[in-house]
Structures are given as C-alpha cells and as structure tokens.
Image: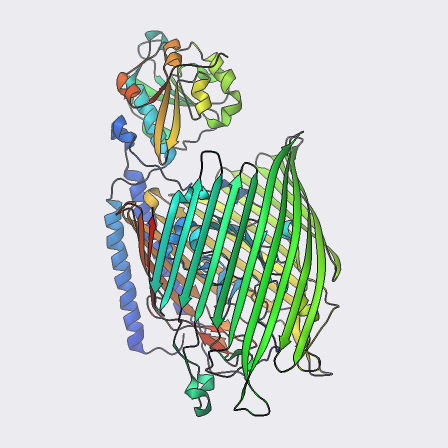
Amino acid sequence: MMKMGLRAQPGRSYRSFFNFRLLCSVSLDFLFVFAMVATAGWAAEAKEDLTALSIEDLMEVRIESVSKFDQRLADAPAFVTIVTSDDIKKHGYRNLPDILQSVRGSFVRYDRNYHYLGLRGFSRAGDYNSRFLLLVDGHRMNDNVFDQSAIGNDFILDVDLIDRVEIIRGPSSSLYGTNAFLGTINIRTKKGKDLKGLEVSGEGGTFTTYKGRLSYGNRFESGLEILLSGSRYESQGDQRLYYKEFDSPSTNNGIVKDADDENYGSLFGSLSFGNLSLEGGYIRRQKEIPTAAFETVFNNDDTKTTDARAFGDLKYRHQLPYGVGVQGRVYYDHYYYRGDYIYADSADPSLLVKNIDKAQTQSMGGEVQFGKALFGRHNFILGAEYQYVFKQDQLNYDTSVYVDDRRRSKNWGLYLQDEFEIFKSLRVNAGVRYDHYSSFGGTVNPRVGITYTPFERTILKLLYGQAFRAPNVYELYYQDPGISQKANPNLDPETIRTVEIGMFQYLGFNVWGTMNLYYQRIRDLIAQQEDPKDGLLVFQNIEGVVQKGLELELEGKWTGGFRSRVSYALQRTEDKKTGTGVANSPAHLLKLNGIVPIVSEKLFLGLEGRYSSRRKTLGGAHSGDAFVTNVTLFSQNVIKGIEVSGSVYNLFNNKYSDPGGGEHVQDSIRQDGRSFRFKLTYRF
Amino acid sequence: MLARSSQGTAWRERARLMLVWLLVTVLLEAAGATEIELPEYRVKAAFLYNFAKFVDWPSKAFSNPRAAFGFCVLGEDPFGSDLEDVVKGKTVNERESALKRIRGLQGLDGCHIVFVSPSEQERYAQILRSLRNAPVLTVGETAEFTKMGGIISFYLDGDRIRLEINIDAGERAGLKISSRLLKLARVVRASWRN
C-alpha cells in the first residue's frame, strides 16, 4: 500500500462554490421523505384493532422481531448507531463502505485501491483507517504493520454474514487500547441458528461484477452451533477510465483500459458449544491500481496490491463462585501484503521495472476479563491483555533490496471499568486502561460517561474520554537508505481528548430524535514531513487538529416494517497551528434511509440518499459536493426459501469525486456513475 | 458538482419529482396492506382481552353485580399504552373493564386477570402461592410460570404467539376455561408442589 511518500500537488481545476441552495433543497427532500414514511407507518400502526379479531385469528398474527428502541444504546457511554442484517438486505448494501456511509456523520473516500472512512470530519490521506478500531465479534482486525482497518472488499467477511454493525463514536481506548481513537466499529456475525441449513447466493452487476457464496449453518439439539461460509468475488471494474491529468499523447491521452480489476476469496467459520466458542476467517484480495499512484507507469494493469488476512479466536466463559464471571480468549492473526509497482527504468525509460513492496506479520495474544456486580449498584470489569507479534517484516526490492526490516514486538494492557447506578435515573460509566508498548513505553487512557434520564422518554449524556494511537512499525522503521524515506524510532503515540454532550428524546409517533455536540483535540499527530536537511520523508509528531461538530438525527420504526432515518452533521476540523480547515473534511453531511413494505412481508422498497458538501483537496482546491441516491427492491418468500433483490446505485448518475491522496497526481478521483446489481439467495 | 447544464438540472428535478410521486403512491398502497407484522405486546394485550371472553369467573370473584372487571399488570409494564387501548371502554359480560398497574401483592383486590411481568421472575413462587385458590386468572411468560401454578403462559413459536394452559391451576382457582380456548393451547396438568 504505501511507500515513496507524499507529495502535495499544485491546485488543479476542480473549483466549485459551496452550494447552499443544494444543501437546503436536499435537506427538505430528505425531511419530506422521512415525513412520508412516518405518516404511512403511523397510519398502518394506528388502524389495527386487534380486538375485532377472533382468538383463532390472533394465533396466526405474526409479531415483529425488531424492538422499537434498543435500551442498550441508551445506556452505552457513547453515541452508537446500529445497522442490522435486515437493513443490509433491504438497502442492497454490497460491502462495508456502503453500510458505513449510510450512518450520520460518516464519509468515505475511495481511490480505486482502498476505501478510507472519515468520522467526525477527520480522515487524513495516508492514515489507512488506523484512527478507528475495527472489530469482528470483539476481535481486533487492524493489522500489525500498518494498523489498517480493511473496510473495502478486503474486509474479511461477506456482508451477508453480518448480523449487525455497531458504530461507536468517540474514544474507546479505556477498553480496547490503541486505534479506538475516533471511533470503534464492531461487527457481530450471524450464528449457526440464523441460517438453519444450507444457503447459496449469487449476485451480478455492472462492471462485469459477480459474487457467489455458499454457507451452511445450524444449531443442533446437543447445543452445538456451527457456521461455515465461503465467498468468491470478481469484477472487471470500470474498463475505461479517464484522468485529465494524464491527457497527453505519451500517456494514452489520459485513458486507462482494463486496469480496475478486483477479486477476492474469503472463508469464515464459527463454532460454539456450551461455554466455548471458536471463530476464524481468511481473505485474499487483489486489486489493480489504475490511477498511476506512486508515480507508476500510466495505463499498466500490472500495478496491483494483494492483501491476505487470517485470524482465529477462541473464547471461554465461566461463572466462578461469589458471582464473578470470567471470560478468557486466545487469538492468532496473520497479515500479508504485497504491492507490485511498475516503473519505467530510470536509465532506459522504454524498459519496465517491477518494484515489489511486501509486509508480513504474525501474532498471538490472550485476554482475560473478570466481571462482578458489587454493592448492588456497581458493575465492575477488570481485564488484562497481552500480545506477542513474532513476525513484523517489511520488504521492498526490485533490482536491489531497498528495505529489509524484520522485528518482533510485544504489548500488553490492563483495564478497569465500573458502571455505577447512583439513582435509577442517573448512571455513571467510568473506565481506564494502561497500555505498554515495547516501542514507546506506557500510556494511560480514561473515559467517563454520565447518563441521566430526567423523564421517561428523555435521555441526556455527557462524555469525556481520552484515546491513543500507537505508532506502527511502518511509521517507525520503514526506510530505504538515502532514497526517499527514513525511519523515526522516537515517535510518540497520538492522543485525542473528547468532550461531548447529547440528548435522546421521544418525539411521539414512534420517532426518536438524537442531538449531539462534540469537541475533540488531537495532539502529536503522526504525519509524514520532508526533512529540509536531506530532503527525505520522515514521520514526525506534529501539532494536531481540533474537531467540532453538531449532529442531529430522527429515527422512526413503525408497524409492518416501515422504518426511516434522517440525519444531518455539521462539522469543522482545523489544523491547530494554522487555524485553517483540513483536507478531506466535508462541512455538511445529510443522510436519509427509508424502508417501505409494498406487499407486506414479501416486497420492500429501500431508499437511500446521501449528500456531502465539498471537500478540500491536498492541492488546495475542492472536490465538489456529492449527492447519491440508491434504490433497492427486495423480495422474500414469494417462492419459499428465495430472496431476490434488484438495486440501482447512484440512480441519477451524478458525477462526483473524492479527494486524491499524496501518492496521486490526480487532485480528485472521479467515482462511479449509475450501476446495478441483481442478487438471488436460496435457502434449502 | 461540476458545471451542470440547465437541461441537466431540469431533468434531475423532474426525476426527483417522479421518485417522490412513486413514493407517495407506494406508501398509500402500503398503508392499505393487511397481514402486517405487529408489536408483540399489542398482540398479547388482545389475547388478555380474549381470555376474559373465554373464561368464566365464579360470582364470589365480584363484590357486587356492578363491580368492574379488573385487568391488572403486576411488575414492570411491558404493554406501554397497548393494554389500555384494548381495554378502554370495553365491557366483559356486561361489566365495565378497568386496568390497574400494581407493584406488590397488596393491590390485587378487584383483579380478575393478572399479568405477571417477566420482571417478577424471581418472585413467581411467592406470587402464585398467595393467589393459589383465589379466583384470579394468572398469566405469565415463561415455561416455569405454568409449572409453578400459573394458569396461562405465553410462548413464542417462531414469530407467532402460543399458549400453554395449566388446567389444574385453573380448577383450583375456581375458573372454568372454555374448550374453545383449551383447543388452541398446549395443555399442562401437573404442577410443582410449592
């Protein structure tokens, strides 16, 4: 993925003005759709007079499985959004970025290689999603060399295996340690009993894209529960891309052909019996890079990245005497990365050189956690975690070897958390964690949250938290002697402090409103700078940024499966030293989701609208605002065991771009226009 | 967005309008749809009302001929406004119906159907013991409940509500349960000695 440093490009031509009228008209549209769904949902809800039914008919009435309000969300010491497997099916979400982008205050950047998530207005080019923690059933997925959260098609799970996604905003280092910086994304997988047998699924869509999946899941009488699944994906991508920065005869007039291919194969399995559970997954993904990133040769489909990840996690739960619950876990992780970069030979430009960039890590770790209720009103958790990374290799070579760094490291952490109910309406959640790294030493990170429920349907929250991000071995040790980049083993971890306040209020008609305000300060930000003494790039701790924002959301769930959510986020992230706004940070984000049952329980319409105001690019210009509409028609049980869906993404074929990274000549990178997908799943 | 032609904008506006129109039509259709999924406790509230119709109480259960028929919820109320909506303004065998929410065993006077909330799970034995011979239809939500002497228990079979009825407990309470109701339920005879 990364290498050869960052370059700021002089301003390119994507000039655009902030379109306030567009923001207003989109807001009104979204509110209007929300109101329509709410009206229909409320009407459906109000009209049912069940007492008119005979008792025999009552026995046939189906009840909803979706609870109207998740009490756990209200109690959590953070602002959490949940996306369920039902949302995923009915909105036609193809991958994790589709899911994450639907959530308030989030935005994604895609550079035709990896997807990068932004939370609370911050997503810095080159951070590879290391400022949030990605968990699968509590297992850390950030790798041990780049700390990257793979959220694109390199994410280890097929989205069909997801039971729910929890997006937990704010710092959580007090529980999880490093990377739980801007937020934590925890993905809960489906269990054997959710599948009840064999399931096969196929999908096809625009850009010659195909995916197939075969899964088996079951829960047996003995209590043994098993799930096994394998998926294969192939896409030719956009076979004709145009980049005007390369529009000259020597670079094929800016046209790239057949260089956007992507494929992956993944496996996942989980097993549980009694107090023991075992889980593991594997993915190998390959993507061609069509953007000539890192100064590679333009229009060459041999430039590509390959990422492979594997993990295993064994958990055991037990009740000890005196009401102490204990949970133990051992885990294994493996990560392999290989980048093939095609360059023109400096001596003879007609010859091509393939530069190979590799990284490989293997690690094992364990965690033990004790929980006990004390004195009637306290709920304590005490935990310890240890990880030994016994392989952390980085390599870069072509005709010579430029980087050959092999090392090992250890880290461990101790944490304590208490949930204290002062009164029935006042609850405090406080936690702290100490982490020790062989690279930089120790760090302490606390978090406190107060939840106050003054009235039955009003919940107030006040939170303060601190988190850190440890420097990774790429930032610390990657160096090609004298060529472009040097090491800095003295890096300190980044730290963030957050204060936020928010309110949940029931507004009537089954609609809940959320409002939250936050202020965050990041210090010792690790950024790649050019050392004036030798012109080499080096990672250093620089001043940092300040993030401020306001988020508003309305969410409603009604009888029959009507659901809708509309949100607005206003955010401002500034460089602390200069006071200017940072790149890749949209000031306004609007999201709309609506699910409408057309034929009850059999046919559903899923609507999604996303608006993002313009973002500053690295070159100092702006990639314009983006407005995307997605529509999905989902059908189930018309024929027993069959689920079918048809989706249109970017329905109005809006042209929009994401800011490019330091490795791109392009200041902004155009995203896909209108595309389609058809999906069929059969359960035996 | 990059420079758009005015034609492009007009097309987008029209497309948006069409989508909204489509949405309105679809929503109106949908609002008329039947056989939709309903909230669990709204359906259970309707069941409670039906129990009143299919069970006979002895006359000693009522202090006078005009006494109201009492629906009571013991413990944390999971019904929200659903039970109230069902019971309000309705009559049971020409008696007015009343709804009471009670916390302890003291408020049980005037209760003819008592729904014992799952929040009282730890106290089932105590509650059922004190109601043992009283002409009260006890309704609960776990398998334990009927085993311990509760009369009717709800359980879920997939996404449908089912009933389990303890006939012995019903007889001890002096209630006569209609065969129409018994036919629809899983019948249990034995009960734990408590």
Q: Position of residue A51 (x, y in %)?
A: 28, 29
Count of picture labels: 0
Q: Quadrant of residue B47?
A: top left
- Is residue A150 shown above or below A10? above
Side of A53 where B130 appears, left or right: right
Residue A638 horizontal side relative to residue A390, left or right: left
When the figure is inspected, residue B157 is found, relative to residue A620, above or below; the finding is: above
- Work out which quarter of the rendered image holds the N terminus of chain A and state it: bottom right
Q: Position of residue A173 (x, y in %)?
A: 64, 53
The residue nearer to you, when weighing A321 against A403, is A403
Judging depth in this view, the residue of A96 and A408 nearest the camera is A408
Q: Residue furthest top?
A: B60
Percent coordinates x, y for residue A432 in the rendering: 69, 48
Give the image quarter of residue A125.
bottom right
Specify how the rendered protein is coloured: rainbow
Q: Nearer the viewer, residue B25 or A130?
A: A130
Residue drawn at (46%, 91%) of the image: A250
From this viewpoint, is residue A618 visible?
no
Left or right of residue A641: residue B118: right
Whether residue A60 is visible here, answered yes or no, is yes
- Which of A598/A234 is in front? A234
The x and y percentages for residue A285 are 49, 65
Q: Residue at x 47, y 81 (%)?
A: A300
